[in-house]
Image (cartoon, grey):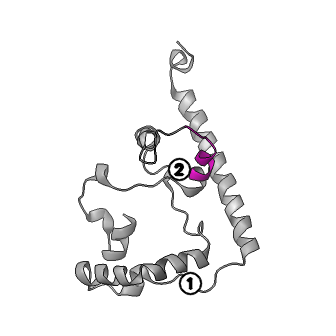
């Protein structure tokens, strides 16, 4: 949906296989998961993500994008590195959309690094509170027997 939002006015009108969509976990949640060594079989293990999608739904905060998560300078360097390839993609697949609309730089009015760090910490705390609330609601909705070990 992120990609299609740049290409068409109303991406919700498109019909495509949602099971094959590339839904990502929230980057703050990924930082939390990174602290659990051995939790995943390998870098391709997405069993947790799939279970979260089935249980909480793709609209849950655990799948929310965080535009400002990455340092703006790092984002610019990545985009500059891939500019030539992105230009070919734009010309081949959606020449009617201006290159800058999809692959352009971020706005110049980025906050200073200290403000970005504070925003990131605040956002991570919000996400944690949201996830804990969702977990508690999920546990409350389960029958009593299902909550205790067998």
Mark number displayed over residue 96: none
Percent across and percent down for residue 12 are: 31, 63
Magenta stretch?
Answer: 30-38
Say which of 13 and 76 sits in front: 76
Side of 49 relative to 75 (left or right): left
Residue 3 versus residue 126 in the image, above or below: below
Side of 94 relative to 133 (left or right): left
Q: Marks 1 and 2, Cα distance to the nearest angstrom?
A: 26 Å
Percent across and percent down for residue 101 are: 40, 83
Side of 144 relative to 44 (left or right): right
Label 2 neighbourhood size at 10 Å, few (<14), some (14-19), many (20+)?
many
Magenta span has 36? yes
Mark number displayed over residue 62: 2
Q: Residue at x 56, y 37 (%)?
A: 38
Q: Residue at x 46, y 80 (%)?
A: 81
Label 1 neighbourhood size at 10 Å, few (<14), some (14-19), many (20+)?
few
Q: Which residue is mark 1?
A: 107
Q: Under tag 2, what secondary structure?
A: helix
């Amino acid at each position: 949906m992120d990609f299609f939002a740049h290409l068409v006015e109303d991406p919700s009108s498109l019909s495509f296989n949602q099971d094959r969509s590339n839904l990502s976990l929230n980057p703050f949640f990924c930082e939390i998961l990174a602290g659990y060594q051995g939790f995943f079989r390998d870098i391709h293990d997405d069993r947790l993500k799939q279970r979260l999608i089935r249980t909480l739904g793709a609209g849950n905060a655990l799948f929310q994008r965080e535009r400002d998560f990455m340092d703006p300078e790092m984002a610019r360097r990545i985009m500059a590195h891939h500019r030539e390839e992105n230009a070919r993609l734009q010309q081949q697949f959606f020449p009617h959309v201006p290159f800058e609309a999809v692959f352009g730089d971020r706005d110049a009015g980025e906050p200073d690094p200290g403000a970005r760090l504070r925003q990131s910490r605040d956002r991570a705390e919000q996400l944690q509170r949201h996830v804990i609330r969702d977990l508690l609601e999920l546990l409350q909705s389960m029958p009593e027997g299902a909550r205790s070990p067998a």
